[in-house]
Image: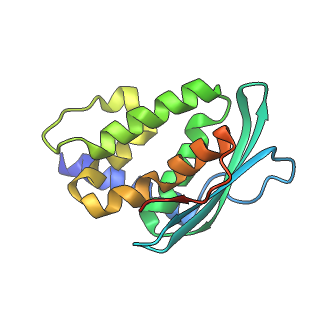
Amino acid sequence: MDELRELYQEMLLDHHKHPRNYGKIESANRTAEGYNPLCGDRVTVYLLLNEDVIEDIAFEGVGCAICKASCSVMTEVVKGKSESDASKIFGEFHDLVTSDTDTEFDADSLGKLAIFAGVREFPLRIKCATLGWHTMQAAITQSEDVVTTE
């Protein structure tokens, strides 16, 4: 289990240091902003939706390692998915990071998202991990309010 935890930490740090899909999408037709006042994380999520498919997704902003890595993995996981599939994946991710630490999870079915299982051991970090996801949901629904974790 320690080897698995170490692998997850390495992947998380890699996504933090080298975030995927980082930057603005000039042709985005949906955007939303998110802010976590507790940690100071600020993200903007850009979506290019074609009908109900997320054709492209990117983010930019400043945040802690967990926030940035979570946004990075999120963009990889939902790109090419329908809005409803992206929402379903968010639900699974949210369940993972908010579940009791004794709750078993299927790392194979979660794929890359499994690297965030350790977040549930640190309740204050859940908001960091979910900020980008909530912001993506706001972009999908075209909410004009800034997403906040408070």
Give the answer, above or below, for where 86 lies relative to 60: above
Give 43 or 78, whichever is nearer the viewer. 43
Q: Residue at x 47, y 61 (%)?
A: 67
Q: Is residue 33 left or right of residue 17?
A: right
Q: Residue at x 56, y 37 (%)?
A: 77
Quarter of the image holding residue 23? bottom right
Q: Residue at x 59, y 35 (%)?
A: 78
Quarter of the image holding residue 96? top left
Q: Position of residue 140 (x, y in %)?
A: 66, 39
What colouring style does the render use?
Answer: rainbow
Give 81 or 88, whichever is nearer the viewer. 88
Q: Position of residue 27 (x, y in %)?
A: 87, 47
Q: Is residue 119 left or right of residue 74?
A: left
Q: Position of residue 2 (x, y in %)?
A: 19, 51
Q: Position of residue 118 (x, y in %)?
A: 27, 52
Q: Is residue 141 left or right of residue 49?
A: left
* Residue found at the far right of this picture: 27
Q: Residue at x 42, y 34 (%)?
A: 91
The total of numbered circles placed on residues is 0
Quadrant placement of the C terminus: bottom left
Quadrant placement of the N terminus: top left
Q: Is residue 81 left or right of residue 26?
A: left
